[in-house]
Image (cartoon, rainbow, N blue to C red):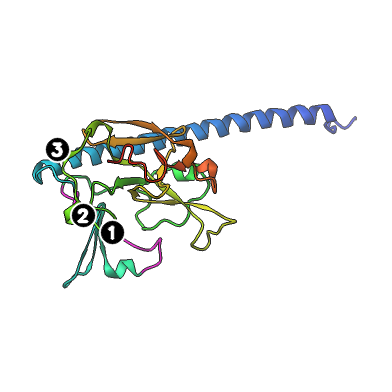
Amino acid sequence: MKNSSRAFTLIEVTIVATIMLVLAACLTGAGWKVYETSSLAVSANTLRQLASGASQYLGDHNQTFWPYRADVQGDNPGRFWWFGFETLASQRRPEGQRQFDPALGPLGGYVAAAWRPDPSFALNGRAFKPKYQSGYLGIGYNILLGGGWTGDPEKLKNYWKLSDPSQIVVFATSAQVNTFQSPASSRNPLLEEFYSLDLQYRTVHFRHHGQAMVAFANGSAGFLPMDESTRDNRMPKANVGRFAPINDKKYLE
């Protein structure tokens, strides 16, 4: 009786390997599409909530924007960021272990407290350590509206004094490239969540097919492209940059 088993020929092995590679490519493409769609939905939902809450806040505060931050002393010292309250004890913890309470921030009474982490960071490789345990918000606030880095009350903008609310971004998808905090370095740049847009730094995240999702001051939303001269080439595929060159106020004021 002949042995029914036989070795695969080189041609058969090649055919099987080719089929496996094609299937893997298809599955990878499908998985990538799921991530992209999920990220788009998360960004859109977060911006929708923020824009709606912002409109209500402005209506209750003489159309004046909220501060980017405000430090408080007393029995419960800490910092009110635009996105929530962080205790002084939390500020002293390593990044990734810090905590904030979105319900106590300036928009706390106007925006749902639950943030869903945006999966877009996974598309760029593992994100640099998150700042907070709650995961990535992935949205930045225009600090030119919110009194600058210190949230100066004298510099808060009023909606009615904006040159063109339909062209001024309040919120945008945001991130930065970190090369200065271990394990990041100049040889190992890593993507990191960020929370603000200003005139100096590359912190707009053009993560949706090279576009940033934005919410304008008039309540509308849409996409804006990157000014290619501002692309952060320390990590070019991360799509981090600006709407306009450094110190150009386009879309910001």
Tell me whether circle 1 and circle 2 mark residues in contact (CB < 8 Å): yes
Image height of 203 relative to 185, above or below: above
- At 21% across and 54% down in the image, what residue appears? 105
- In the picture, the quarter occupied by the N terminus is top right
Q: Secondary structure at mark 2?
A: loop
Pointer 2 local density, CA inside 10 Å: few below 14, some 14–19, many at least 20: many
Q: Badge 1 is on which residue? A: 100
Q: Nearer the viewer, residue 227 or 240?
A: 227
Q: Badge 3 is on which residue? A: 160
Magenta span includes 215 = no
Secondary structure mostly seen in the magenta stretch: loop
Q: Secondary structure at mark 3?
A: helix
Q: CA distance from mark 1 to mark 2?
A: 9 Å
Tell which residue pokes out farthest to the front in this image: 247
Task: Please report whichever mark, 1 or 3, sits nearer to the chain's N-terminal start.
Answer: 1
Image coordinates of residue 158 in percent, x first then y, are 16, 43
Q: CA distance from mark 3 to mark 2?
A: 24 Å
- In the picture, the quarter occupied by the C terminus is top left
